[in-house]
Amino acid sequence: MEVEILGQGEPEHAVIGLIHGDEPCGSEAIERFKRSDYSVKKPVKLILANEKAAEKGVRYIDCDLNRNFPGDKESSKHEEKLAAEILEEVKGLEILSLHSTKSYSNPFAAQSILDKEDIEMIKDTGVRLVSFMENPINCLGEYSKAVTVECGFQGSDNAAKNGYRVLINFLAANNVIDVEYRRSEPDMFKVFETIEKPDYEFTAANFQKVQKGEVYARRNGEELVAKEDFYPVLMSTNGYDTILGHKAKKIDKKRYLKLLLFGE
């Protein structure tokens, strides 16, 4: 793990890349920022997490880092030990974690927790879409105040460019650098079902409504037909070994925020 603080004093924010070693967009965005001419007004912590996996071009060495928080400093498994070390580095900080996918070209936030603070942090990134899967998986965001942004197709130049734009917007919105930024009002989608059909060809489009009765995947003449309206999230033909992806419903933002503030 490489950790660097830019600026003087104790940082309130951190940017993390390489939670997964085969997702280089975060490290490329961070390195580009370090080479830039931006003047840092407030300190920020920059972390390249799983460098060991990145050197080998693999997602992880022993186990998926983003499924093994809070980790164990005494573990013999690389990622379990690394997870504990990362949490020490980011304790008390607001975190932007940069990732990439095999399913979608544009940046979006992907959360397993979505409270009012998370929503405000997501607005700081400028992204227009949020997927929310209320399913604890021992990821970074469950043990810290983190926003995860999927920046684009894994390994693509576009993902690195998107990651850099998101990083700059996030830092500017938090007064770390002085540059114009925008706070978004993203559409939010809550996952309600996982489709365990990894060997199907996905024929619809992520974040675009699939109507009841519409075909959204096929294999050898067999078709998957929507039983209800839904929005695909992280669906792809070759993205996962065990699933096709997820179905989601679009969240009524005003009602959701009201529930967060006042309860049922």
Image (cartoon, rainbow, N blue to C red):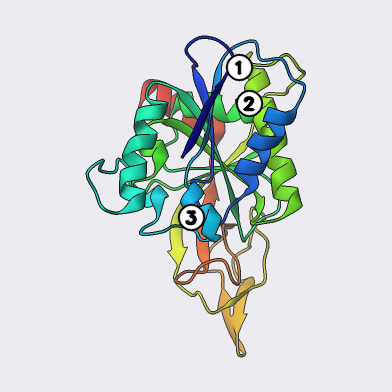
Mark sitting earlier along the chain (1/3): 3
* In front of the other: 206 or 161: 161
Q: Does dot 2 land on a helix, a strand or a loop?
A: helix
Task: Give, as a three-letter code, the residue at label 2.
Answer: Phe
- Residue at 67% in and 51% down: 152
Residue that appears at 55% across and 10% down = 8
The secondary element bearing badge 3 is classed as helix
Q: How far apart are marks 3 and 2 (CA)?
A: 26 Å
Q: In terms of sequence position, does the residue under pointer 3 or pointer 2 come before the other?
A: 3
Q: Answer yes or no: is residue 184 visible.
A: no
Kind of residue indicated by mark 3: Ala
Asked if the residues shown at circle 1 and circle 2 are in contact, with their CB atoms under 8 angstroms apart, the answer is yes
Other-residue count near label 2 (Cα within 10 Å), few / some / many at <14 / 14–19 / ≥20: many
Res. 118 visible in picture:
yes
Mark 1 neighbour class, 10 Å CA radius: few under 14, some 14 to 19, many 20 or more: some
Instruction: Write the residue at 36% across / 58% down.
Output: 63
Q: In this view, does 234 lie above or below 150?
A: below
Tag 1, which secondary structure? loop
Q: Where is residue 4 in the image (x, y as percent from the top left)?
A: 53, 27
The tag on residue 53 is 3
The amino acid pointed to by label 1 is Asn
Q: Residue 3 carries which label?
A: none
Above or below: residue 179 compared with residue 240 = above
Residue at numbered disc 2: 170
Q: Mark 1 points at which residue?
A: 174
Using a 10 Å C-alpha cutoff, classify the residue at mark 3 as few (fewer than 14 neighbours), some (14 to 19) or many (20 or more). Answer: many
Q: How far apart are marks 1 and 3 (CA)?
A: 31 Å
